Image (tube, grey):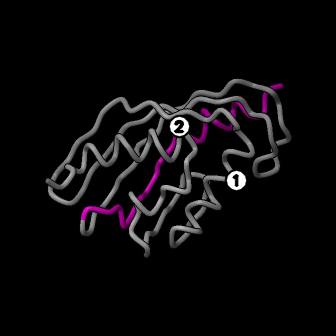
Amino acid sequence: MAKQPRQIIEEYYEVLWNEKKLSEANKFLHSTITFRGSLGMRVEGINGFCDYAKMLFGAFPNLYHVIEDVVCEGDKVAARVVYTGTHSGKLFGFEPTGNRIRYSGASFFQFENDKIIDIWVLGDLNALYGQLSNA
């Protein structure tokens, strides 16, 4: 029996983001995935996605995602997520502050053949940047 989109999204966050097992990305992501992140990045393909994730892990080695809500309709899923971590590496001109960050976002997913083919993340950048700029 095929996994439901909600289950795939829950595992996507747990395995790829929280456990940082990017070697398992092909289990969740379509080979032609397009990922648009809140931080102004657009990447394509599994390698592009993994490079983006590694960049974030470099800035926030303990980055953690908590799912607050998930809404599914057909081949589309929306998830409201809270992101936490410690700013330990440079990110977009922000030198490491050691600050513990916490901000919210929403991610919109589209599926094709039980794999995520499109992700669009909209995060609260005002909250994030405020936490990165205060030492």
Q: Is residue 118 above or below residue 127?
A: below
Near mark 1 (Cα within 10 A), the count class, few <14, some 14-19 or many ≥20, is some
Nearest to the observer: residue 121 or residue 44? 44
Q: Residue 18 carries which label?
A: 2
Q: Give the range drawn in magenta.
A: 114-135
Near mark 2 (Cα within 10 A), the count class, few <14, some 14-19 or many ≥20, is some
Q: Is residue 51 above or below residue 57?
A: below
Q: Which of marks 2 and 1 is nearer the N terminus?
A: 2
Q: Does the magenta portion include 58?
A: no
Q: What element carries label 1?
A: helix
In the rendered image, residue 102, in percent from the top left (x then y), is placed at: 59, 27
In the rendered image, residue 64, in percent from the top left (x then y), is placed at: 55, 33
In the rendered image, residue 127, in percent from the top left (x then y), is placed at: 60, 32
Q: Quadrant of the C terminus?
A: top right
- Identify which residue is drawn at 39% across, 33% down: 67
Is 52 displayed left or right of 77 in the figure? right
- Identify which residue is drawn at 68% across, 38% down: 129
Front disc: 2 or 1: 2
Say what amino acid the circle numbered 1 marks. Answer: Met
Q: Is mark 2 on a helix, strand or loop?
A: helix
Is 46 displayed left or right of 116 in the figure? right
Is 48 displayed left or right of 7 in the figure? right
Q: Does the magenta portion include 123?
A: yes
- The residue beneath circle 1 is 55
The CA distance from mark 2 to mark 1 is 15 Å
Say what amino acid the circle numbered 2 marks. Answer: Asn
- Identify which residue is drawn at 27% across, 50% down: 77
**Count of numbered circles in the view:** 2
In the rendered image, residue 12, in percent from the top left (x then y), is placed at: 41, 47
Is 22 displayed left or right of 116 in the figure? right
Q: Are marks 2 and 1 in contact (CB under 8 Å)?
A: no
